[in-house]
Amino acid sequence: MAVVGPRALHQAHPRLIGHIASEFNALADATWLVTSYGLAQSASQPLYGKLSDIFGRRSNLVVSYSFFIVGCFICGIGNKYWQILAGRAISGIGGAGMTALVSIILTDMVPVRSVAAWRSYVNVAATVGRALGGPVGGWLTDSVGWRWSFYGQCIPTFLGLVLVLWKLPSPAPVTGPDDSEGNEDQETSKFSRIDGIGAVVLAATISFFLLAVDSGTSGKPWPFVVATSLVFLVLLVAFYFVEKRWAKEPVLPIELLAKRDVWSTYLIASLQIAAQFGVFYTVPIYFQIASHKSVTAAGSRLIPAVVGNATGGLLSGYIITKTGRYKHLTTLGSAAACVAYLLLILRWRGHHHPAELVYIFPGGFGSGVIQSTTFIHLAACLDQSEIAIAGTSLYLSQNVGLLVGISLATAVLHAKLRTNLNNDLDGFKHKVDIISRAESSIERIWDLPYAIQRIVVKAYVDSLLYAYAVSLCLAFIALLIGLFIRERKL
């Protein structure tokens, strides 16, 4: 549900965002329906690692399910736009734990060598969620209203919560320095272990980083971009000193982040996700422009990549379980993605054979492989007591990579499009109005005279090549880093 939820709102049914915002006369702030969820999810993601060490995995998973249900319910009953945004943020906090804690629980229950296979099943479930989220959300909106796209998530999530309480074992939390069997104030001792200052500073640091990236790539005024960037840098320095000098049990230990095996894994995961979601964003645009497809039809062209993701996860999980090897798989995953993005640059020039849609399969396949191997690499390189914090932070790196990848693809696409249209429409009357139309809505392009339509379509297709090139560069950097990771015996 943590995967279906956000996709139901914005991945395969983008008009739902505008529909909800328009009802509250807040169309200019429509993107906050997505941003509020993403910010809350990213800011809270790493906190679940330490909290699950202190209070136990099951109790944290119960809390995350509860947050998600409450957030979706608030969105459903909200009568003001700020209430909808608050509900989205609350559900984002829940979604952070629902996605990350599953993998952490798997490492507690099965041997490291078998974790990859089990996580591949989780990846298939997530893939199904990505595929179902948009269509289900759109169907509910069209049939009974948009509020039921939120209400509809409460019931299955509640059933999941019941299953967690009924079937999931509750292993003992990680013991802290002040905990003991005879300590009557053990619960108080647990709360005293929480690095509250570090948690707040970390959440603020992540939030301002994402705001800086979003503002820098979406055309916000430069004073705002500079201000958010400076606040991020100040908070980053503050977080370093809080975790290094102040916290007894840091929420995210600096020593952990400084380990080569850890930061290299985070880089590979975030770069690969950034590359893939940059393509996920641009492929539907290509088919809307080049083939004049509807939003739904263009979104369905992502199916080969989604199938590739599931295939890569399942195959890599099987191979790791059988051989105990994962480094070559990591290299293979990044290389497959590079091949996919290179083929898009070389072949998708506005006219292509339908069979060439298969080019995006290797990109999804590579991402599925990387999602399996990076987590296994962490589990193999770290002590069991470090897995929870490192694992939830891995999910954070993927979330950040996702948002950065989409932001970069958007920024490059629109910057190059503006340049192309300025050059190609030189001498045309109403050039500024034409460019504004082309940038604001793809649907408005088809209202232009045919000759101008062809110019705009060509400018779009040429600009998309640069967005694919960004994904290629990101995947190639991930490939280079993957060549130097140190494989550990499983």
Image (tube, rainbow, N blue to C red):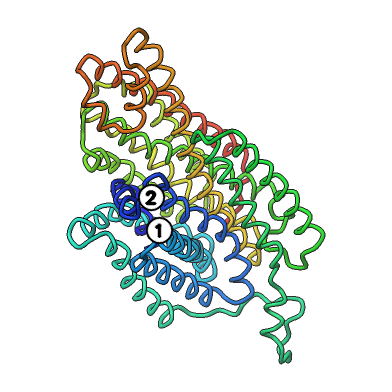
Is 446 on the left-hand or right-hand side of 378?
left
Q: Quadrant of the N terminus?
A: bottom left
Which mark, by number, is residue 59? none
Proximity of marks 2 and 1: CB atoms separated by less than 8 Å: yes
Asked where in the image residue 139 lies, by quadrant, the reply is bottom left
- Identify which residue is drawn at 32% across, 21% down: 434
What residue is shown with label 2? 26
Q: Give the image location of residue 116, x and y in percent.
A: 47, 57
Q: Earlier in the sequence, mark 2 or mark 1?
A: 2
Front residue of 333/288: it is 288
- Identify which residue is drawn at 64% across, 47% down: 263
What residue is shown with label 1? 81
Query: Type of residue at label 2?
Result: Ala
Front residue of 74/417: it is 74
Is 8 on the left-hand or right-hand side of 161?
left
Furthest residue toward left: 143
